[in-house]
Image: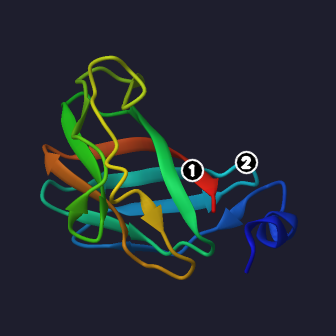
Amino acid sequence: MKSIDFVQLVPLTGLDLTVTLSGTGAATAKLFQNGRIYINVTTTLEVSKTLTLNVPTSLRVIDVRTIHNNATAASIQIKNDTTAVTSVIVAAAVDKDVDGVHTATAGTIDDAQYEFTEGDDDLVVAVSVAAFLGDIIIDTVFI
């Protein structure tokens, strides 16, 4: 489906995305008309575990932020299946702390890995240090 057709089908309240978790945890995800993916992790994602999203249209990841609600620091990384899209994002040990790749200290997005095709189920959030609880905001553009 062409991205312009897809955007017209997305309700203003967002389109629910299918979330698959390895290990324990709970999360919901929505894709909005502006390309933003909002993931709400409601039960802690454990270290060395993943959250995988199915993308209903082709898109490119252009920015990522976290709002960490856990007093223990955590690290996450966006991957295309098993290959890194972003550098590791460190969510500091401060409630409601905002961290992400758009900041000067967080790093890069790999333009060889940042594209996802309609129907892919390989947009992965990997937790690498401690456990993550909070929100993950992934900004995308439709392609």
Tag 2: residue type? Asn
Left or right placement of residue 81 versus residue 60 in this view: left
Q: Secondary structure at mark 2?
A: loop
**What's the residue at 42%, 52% (across, down)?**
41
Left or right placement of residue 28 versus residue 65 in this view: right
User: According to the image, label 1 marks what residue?
Assistant: 140
Separation of residues labelled 2 and 1 (CA atoms) = 8 Å
**What's the residue at 52%, 56% (across, down)?**
60
Q: Earlier in the sequence, mark 2 or mark 1?
A: 2
Q: Which quadrant of the view contains residue 108? A: top left
Q: Secondary structure at mark 1?
A: strand
User: According to the image, label 2 marks what residue?
Assistant: 34
**What's the residue at 57%, 50% (across, down)?**
140
Name the one closer to the observer, 22 or 106: 106
Tag 1: residue type? Thr
Residue 8 screen position, x and y as percent: 87, 66
Left or right placement of residue 3 versus residue 64 in this view: right
Looking at the picture, does residue 102 appear above or below residue 124? Answer: above
